[in-house]
Image (cartoon, rainbow, N blue to C red):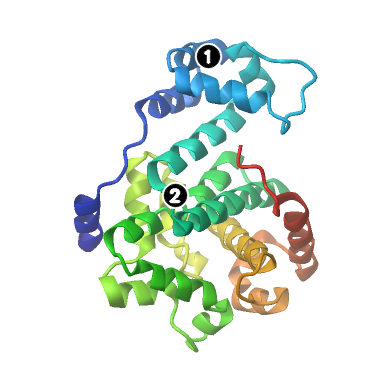
Amino acid sequence: MKQAEDIVASVGIPSQPAIMMEINDEINNPNSDLQSVSEIISRDVATAAKLLKVINSAFFGLGEKVDSIQRALSLMGLQNFKKIILSSALREAFCSKSSGSEKFWKHSMQTATIAARIAEKVGYNPLDQAYIAGLFHDCGVPLLMKKFPDYHEVTDYALSVVGADSLTGKTKSVIVVEDERYNIHHCALGHLVAKSWRLSDAVIQVILYHHYVDIDCHKDPSVRKLSAILFLADYLAAYLLYLSGGSPIDSEDEWAAMHKQVVAELEFEIEDIKDLKDEAEEQLYNFDEH
């Protein structure tokens, strides 16, 4: 972890915007209401504009124009609003216009959206934690891109590796390659980013261990469930990448055989995974980035 801290010190973790922290604190306050959150948003022109742009977009399909912050929040819901502004803040803070950054962003958004759907399917609460875990799980990657000019070679390698091969030792996993090259891996960096951005303890833990297939390392049942959700969401997002011309991935049977703890934790059958694949393809292939 010392190496991760050194890299963070040299590259710097982009700060979570102050307005984001203030909104988060207010949403998490049990005494908060739409009016109090609306008042905070109204003080920040960019956040208010983002909210109104999204609520009036085709995604929500409203038959009327909404120009009130409080009404927009009422229609959208506080948790949906939180996801949207957190996604926007992450992209603005970590992503450049490079192709590597775009791939990172697309995978993160798809993993987040799929994770939220899986959480809904298995009755995991709070739902927004699954989304946030998916959104931030690879947030250490852009820091490595920024620090090491040759990191694109690692991402190319990661996209070419079939999961079962790395788990059986036939090929090296991406975190092993990162450790060998840089004496650090993106999970450790992501862990520090998550702590800096004041994400929940559960999300911080699953980010650190999201390449560690033994999910029983998490003693808290809720964290273990979240870890299982993230593993499956990551696999399904990789499937979407394959559909758009990426490298082949494990079949459902191969993946389930290598992730027995995950499948057991979610109480899924192979058919459930196949159904989620179909659903992911239908809903997310051309996902809306807002």
Q: Is residue 222 visible?
A: no
- Give the residue type at disc 1: Ser
Label for residue 38? 1
Among numbered discs 2 and 1, the one appearing first in the sequence: 1
Locate the N terminus and report the quarter of the image it occupies: bottom left
Q: Secondary structure at mark 1?
A: helix
> Label 1 crowding class (10 Å Cα cut-off): few <14, some 14-19, many 20+?
some
Locate the C terminus and report the quarter of the image it occupies: top right
Quarter where residue 270 is shown? bottom right
Q: Nearer the viewer, residue 24 or 59?
A: 59
137 left or right of 251 in image: left
226 left or right of 96 in image: right
Label 2 sits on residue: 97
Residue 77 percent across, percent down from the top left: 64, 25
Quarter where residue 177 is shown? bottom left
Q: Nearer the viewer, residue 119 or 11?
A: 11
Identity of the residue furthest to the bottom in this view: 170
Residue located 57% across and 62% down the image = 231
Quarter where residue 60 is shown? top right
54 left or right of 46 in image: right
Residue 167 percent across, percent down from the top left: 51, 80
Q: Secondary structure at mark 2?
A: loop
Residue located 43% across and 39% down the image = 92
Q: Nearer the viewer, mark 2 or mark 1?
A: 2
Q: Is residue 286 visible?
A: yes
Residue located 40% across and 59% down the image = 141
Q: Nearer the viewer, residue 93 or 214?
A: 93
